Amino acid sequence: MPPATIAAADALFEIEVRPSTQPMTRAELRSGLAVFDGMMVTLGDVVTADLLQDFGRPRCKILANFGVGFNHIDTEACRAHGVTVSNTPGAVTDATADVAMTLILMACRRAGEAERLVRAGRWSGWHPTQMLGMHVTGRRLGILGMGRIGQAIARRGHFGFGMDVGYVARSQKDLAFPATRHDSLGDLAAWADILVVAVPASPETHHMVDASVLEAMPSHAVLINIARGDIVEEAALIAALDQGQIAAAGLDVYEFEPKVPQGLLKHENAVLLPHLGTACLDVRESMGAMAVENLRAFFAGEPVPNRVN
């Protein structure tokens, strides 16, 4: 955790800080549920119904998730066992949208491949057809999920790059910029030059971007995922890249993270980042402050600001 987060928590509670950055094991999670009154957890700390089944009401009464996505926590099982779950929305929005734009530019303009060319000493100099990519300005930007992050990406695309914005969402959005809601993800995929996955992970969105969606995309199109890895069917994406169905992909998340399959690593047109979405100190400090405030409010008997269950 950032030092400011630890200091804020230490000012309010008696705390124990794990020295490891690796996800908690099942044994550690089970012990934590029995020993601590509350825990601040991260996306690798998987809390399942079977993990909770040994407890009636564990001593741990709140899991303050350090992050906006909470698909690694079975919130309904937590509710059944008297455990509150909270997250940190808002703090991550702009930083994640910035990484989406980074991936769009890198994938469309072949920046990763180009940088590797230079570092390998294989660049022979400029010529008129050197590493031609896709011009981003004025392109069609399709967004799957028009929540906070989706809207932040759309604003950057429209105002910064003059892009036409299309989206799919459960409801029509009242937006401060022009955008067209499409009837289905298939329609959006067929329309877009760049398709960005920005929908929350849930059982309903698991493998939402599957082979049929990838097949609907134009051959020049680019897929970007800054949401959660399992929303994209990774095997289908690898097959699409193998067969040249799409031009490129830019990923910050992976289906079996942190495992990145060789099928992706081998493709020069796959831009692969190590989950950098919120990797700025001030952003992580804001996330930590929000998580600590959720804990403070809970133990003060106040409404938890960002409760998700």
Image (cartoon, rainbow, N blue to C red):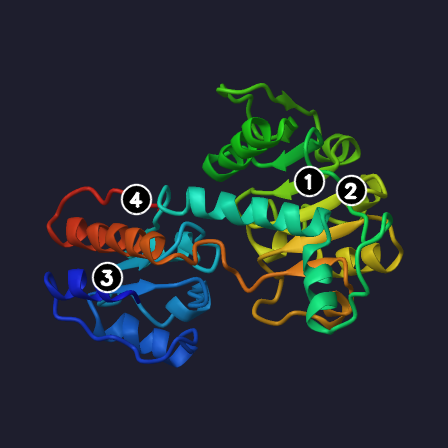
Eyeballing the image, is 182 above or below 123? above
Q: Which residue is mark 4?
A: 306
Mark 3 to mark 1 CA distance (whole Å): 35 Å
Q: Nearer the viewer, mark 2 or mark 4?
A: 2
Mark 4 to mark 1 CA distance (whole Å): 29 Å
Q: Which residue is mark 2?
A: 221
Q: Nearer the viewer, mark 4 or mark 1?
A: 1
What amino acid is at disc 2? Ala
Mark 2 to mark 4 CA distance (whole Å): 37 Å
Examine the rendering and report whether any part of residue 202 can be seen: no
Mark 1 to mark 2 CA distance (whole Å): 8 Å
Mark 2 to mark 3 CA distance (whole Å): 41 Å
Q: Nearer the viewer, residue 146 or 163?
A: 163
Q: Earlier in the sequence, mark 2 or mark 3?
A: 3
Q: Secondary structure at mark 2?
A: loop
Q: Position of residue 281 (x, y in %)?
A: 34, 58
Q: Check disc 4: other Cα within 10 Å, few if <14, some if 14-19, many if 20+.
A: some
Q: Nearer the viewer, residue 105 or 118?
A: 118
Q: Secondary structure at mark 1?
A: strand
Q: Nearer the viewer, mark 3 or mark 4?
A: 3
What amino acid is at disc 1? Leu
Q: Which residue is mark 3?
A: 5
Q: Check disc 3: other Cα within 10 Å, few if <14, some if 14-19, many if 20+.
A: some
Q: Earlier in the sequence, mark 2 or mark 4?
A: 2
Q: Are marks 1 and 2 in contact (CB under 8 Å)?
A: yes
